[in-house]
Image: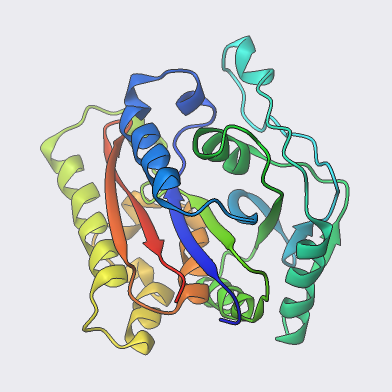
Amino acid sequence: MKADINVLFISHGGGPMPLLGDPGHREMVDRLTELAGKLQKPSAILVISAHWEESVPTVTSGANPQLIYDYYGFPPEAYTIEYPCPGEPGLADQVCQVLDEHGIPARLDDQRGFDHGLFVPLKLMYPEADIPCVQLSLVDSLDADTHLAIGRALQALDYDNLLVIGSGFSFHNMRAFFWAQTPEIQARNQAFEDWLEATCADASLQETERAERLAHWERAPYARFCHPREEHLLPLHVSYGLANKPCDSYISANILGKTSGMIYWEAP
């Protein structure tokens, strides 16, 4: 990488619940606030959110994006949350440019706002809302190799003290969140989480092997139980594609009764 870029994949919890005092998100809130306290405050933040899919990678380029309350059925206060961070059109232009230069057609969107994959975790991590932010979409093919390639292209970014966050969830079977936490469900959840930790953290793996495991993540134990649809896992693929090395830390948190991971790659 050309610049000082820290990379983080986070499990961002259920909608606005982490901001509403939900006890099932206490560990997540603690882990995110601890991480923010350990990191140097970034100059800007690029977020790849599980909650935005487009036909090509698309980048928010507005100077002051509004918030998108892309959830339903929550108390009224969930729809008055504020996070008035500025955009960063210069970073957005650069993201689009490096993707294009690596053969990945991309486009800018100066109208789209920030969804809860950005504003919920960042309100916990950086409540002052004074760090410029840009959001990058997933590609709606949900192809793992495509998202690894997007991450590799982002290695060409030249932006000092940038924090890149893949905002997803390492466990995202929505129905299972409402089932009884049986030993069988817990074992399935833990088996996939153990595989994910080994894949990201094992320094003995060659990077080609690590990428191959992520490209074929469906082969992992109980992969499709933990991710019936993979949009909440793919921000990890972009994050790893950018970092291209074993993670520096793998942090576990119990979120809504499920073991979930936060993964950090420190800048070289």
Residue visible at 72% across and 66% down?
Answer: 57
Q: Position of residue 209 (x, y in %)?
A: 32, 86
Q: Residue furthest left?
A: 183
Q: Position of residue 129 (x, y in %)?
A: 66, 36
Res. 139 in view = no
Q: Which quarter shows the N terminus? A: bottom right
Placement of 180 over or under 97, stated as above or below: above
Residue 130 appears in which quarter of the rendering?
top right
- Residue in view at x 26 percent, y 47 percent: 252
Residue 174 shown left or right of residue 165 in the figure? left
Q: How many marks?
A: 0
Q: What is the basis of the colouring in this image?
A: rainbow
Q: Quadrant of the C terminus?
A: bottom left
| Residue found at the far front of this picture | 40
Which of the 4 image quadrants contains residue 60?
bottom right
The residue closer to the viewer here, 266 or 92, is 266
Q: Nearer the viewer, residue 196 or 94?
A: 94
- Which percent across, then down, holds residue 70? 66, 33
As drawn, 203 above or below 139: below
Image side of residue 179 versus residue 29, left or right: left
Up-down relation of residue 177 to residue 191 (above or below): above
Q: Nearest the camera: 41 or 35? A: 41
Left or right placement of residue 119 versus residue 91 in this view: left
The quarter of the displayed image where residue 30 is located? top left
Residue shown at the point (37%, 58%) measured from the top left: 263
Residue closest to the eye, 159 or 115: 159
Please say whether residue 41 is visible from this viewpoint.
Answer: yes
